[in-house]
């Protein structure tokens, strides 16, 4: 007799079916994760080896080869832009330290390469803006599709706060985090990957939100007279433009916070009046 209504029989059949189908899927996910982790470790190891474990040392090495690098840029400008974009994307995508010094270096380099502070600022700004957003989105996707379980255990408390804030404020919450860096860049990328936010939304909000800070950092880089000025131990003459840039970096979050608080209060007041 057919036993289609027998719970025990159904349960055992389903269990076998689930077990047979989920085991290969779990194994495939494990292999994919292993491949990605190995690739990321290889990239991180290569970057660490190149820098000798010290970003300052790496930049000083570049400074010593300044003329050679500038000559190569004159011959193959698009190759240099592609290398700069890829390097910045990888550094931010796998959360390696050194994004801020790299931003200053790019500002300095492109200003020298194009022999124009304005031209160099614009080129560096485009490269860094898109590269930083690409790296952030890479970390976002890795968090969502490969490391979700591990990161949920690691950032469970922050995830609850992020989800609650997103439900209340929407994308404006991510925008405020990008404008006012009270939460580390890499934490935002990883935790946002665990939220329901769409990758396309994460991309454009991050791109717009990080742009003002990127402009200030790039401008500060264009004011440098040389890369070794970043890590020089002896005293040196600091350009006034560089002083203004770093003063703006310090006050920028405070200015933005006040403007955003005023915007929020105006929005809430208009909403209350409308209701």
Image: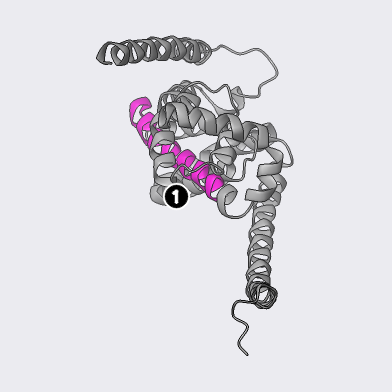
Q: Is residue 220 rendered to the left or right of residue 94?
A: left
Residue receiving disc 1: 82
17 or 171, which lies in front?
17
29 or 214, which lies in front?
29
Is 179 within the magenta? no
Crowding at dot 1, Cα within 10 Å, few <14 / some 14-19 / many 20+, comes out as few
Residue plotted at (64% across, 51% down): 147
Res 115 seen here: no
Residue plotted at (58% across, 29% down): 161
67 or 110, which lies in front?
110
Position in image of residue 177 (x %, y %): 50, 26
Q: Is residue 234 rendered to the left or right of residue 202?
A: right
Res 236 seen here: yes
Magenta span covers which residues? Answer: 115-141
Position in image of residue 238 (x %, y %): 54, 12
Residue plotted at (33% across, 31% down): 119
Q: Residue furthest left?
A: 274
251 or 273, which lies in front?
273
Q: Is residue 67 rendered to the left or right of residue 156?
A: left
């Amino acid at each position: 007799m057919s036993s289609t209504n027998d719970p025990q029989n159904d349960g055992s059949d389903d269990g076998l079916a689930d077990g047979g189908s989920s085991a290969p899927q779990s194994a495939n996910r494990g292999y994919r994760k292993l491949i990605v982790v190995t690739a990321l470790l290889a990239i991180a190891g290569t970057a660490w080896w190149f820098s000798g474990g010290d970003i300052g040392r790496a930049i000083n090495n570049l400074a010593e080869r300044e003329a050679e690098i500038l000559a190569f840029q004159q011959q193959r400008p698009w190759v240099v832009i592609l290398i700069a974009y890829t390097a910045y994307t990888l550094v931010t995508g796998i959360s390696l330290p050194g994004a801020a010094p790299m931003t200053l270096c790019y500002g300095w380099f492109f200003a020298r390469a194009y022999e124009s502070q304005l031209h160099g600022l614009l080129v560096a700004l485009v490269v860094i803006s898109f590269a930083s957003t690409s790296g952030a989105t890479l970390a976002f996707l890795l968090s969502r599709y490969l490391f979700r379980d591990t990161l949920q255990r690691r950032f469970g408390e922050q995830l609850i706060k992020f989800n609650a804030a997103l439900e209340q404020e929407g994308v404006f919450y991510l925008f405020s985090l990008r404008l006012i860096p009270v939460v580390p860049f890499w934490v935002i990328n990883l935790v946002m990957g665990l939220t329901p936010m769409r990758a396309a939304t994460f991309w454009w909000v991050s791109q717009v939100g990080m742009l003002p800070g990127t402009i200030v950092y790039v401008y500060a880089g264009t004011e440098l007279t040389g890369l070794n000025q970043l890590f020089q131990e002896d005293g040196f003459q600091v350009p006034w433009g560089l002083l203004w840039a770093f003063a703006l970096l310090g006050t920028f979050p405070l200015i933005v916070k006040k403007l955003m608080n005023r915007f929020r209060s105006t929005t809430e007041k208009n909403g209350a009046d409308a209701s």
